[in-house]
Amino acid sequence: MNDVIELTGLSNEEFFARHAGAGRVGLVGGTALIDRAICRAQRHVSDGKAWSYWSHAFLMQGPRHDGHHWVIESDLDIHRKHIRLGVQENRMNKYHDEELYSTVAVLDFGLTAEQTAAILTEGLNLVADRTRYSLRELLGAMVAMKNQTMRGRTNVLSREKSLFCSALVRHLFRSAEVDLTPGLDVKQTAPEDLARSVVPHTTYLLKREVATSRFKTLKEKLRTR
């Protein structure tokens, strides 16, 4: 049985401080243009064609010696002249900005200590191996969403040593013999699929109205060109 516990009146920082934990899955819905595009593409996962709340997924490591919660994720991170594209470790505080991440969730699958250790070990192995983030695989998954029969097949744009965000989470759980979305190819797994996992879990949800002003401004600029 899956329980959803919806919370209000918390900042993202307070929410994650209360519910983050090693081996738990984080979901966020971003307000940037690329995030909204990913949310829109996942409408094919829903029978009602509703946009997904989720544009990114990651695995939580728990607190470290610096007092911060850390995550393992596959992402594109650009900071000044430094670019990281692939599986990486980051502090949870990158998701504390409510204007950038309007809706957030934590999925607790009730893992054993042994399962958590296996998942974190595999995640750190992928960080050390510099596993890439694949935009082409993400595109292949988005195309397959329009035809659900394709989602059980190998991603047509699959490549070696690469995983996008939700595919990474799915892969990590399979390393502990937990399949979050049976029937789908690993590299066809979207954040919305993780949210809908049939594996028993508790979802802690902090949902706000999506801030679309930035998205609308970009659309208006494009129309005037």
Image (tube, rainbow, N blue to C red):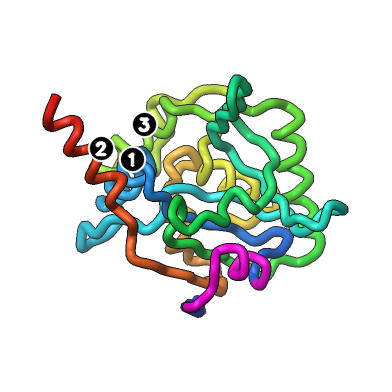
Using the numbered discs, state the Cα–Cα distance from disc 3 to disc 2 in whole angstroms. Answer: 25 Å
Task: Say what secondary structure mark 2 lies in.
Answer: helix
What residue does disc 3 label? 140
Q: Earlier in the sequence, mark 3 or mark 2?
A: 3
Is 220 situated left or right of 174 in this image?
Answer: left
Q: Residue furthest top?
A: 81
- Magenta segment includes 210: no
| Front disc: 1 or 3 | 1
Q: Quadrant of the image for the C terminus? A: top left
What residue does disc 1 label? 33
Would you place residue 28 above or below residue 21 in this image? above
Please name the residue shown 33% across and 38% down the image. 142
Question: For the residue marked with disc 3, what is the amino acid?
Answer: Gly
| Front disc: 3 or 2 | 2
User: Do the residues under discs 1 and 3 have CB atoms within 8 angstroms?
Assistant: no
Q: Residues within 10 Å of mark 3 (few under 14, many from 20)?
A: some
| Picture mark count | 3
Residue 81 on image: x %, y %: 60, 20
- Magenta segment includes 12: yes
Using the numbered discs, state the Cα–Cα distance from disc 2 to disc 1 in whole angstroms. Answer: 8 Å
Give the magenta range.
7-18
Please name the residue shown 28% across and 48% down the image. 40
Q: Earlier in the sequence, mark 2 or mark 1?
A: 1
Q: Which mark is residue 118?
A: none
Q: Residue furthest left?
A: 224
What residue does disc 2 label? 218
Residue 211 on image: x %, y %: 33, 56
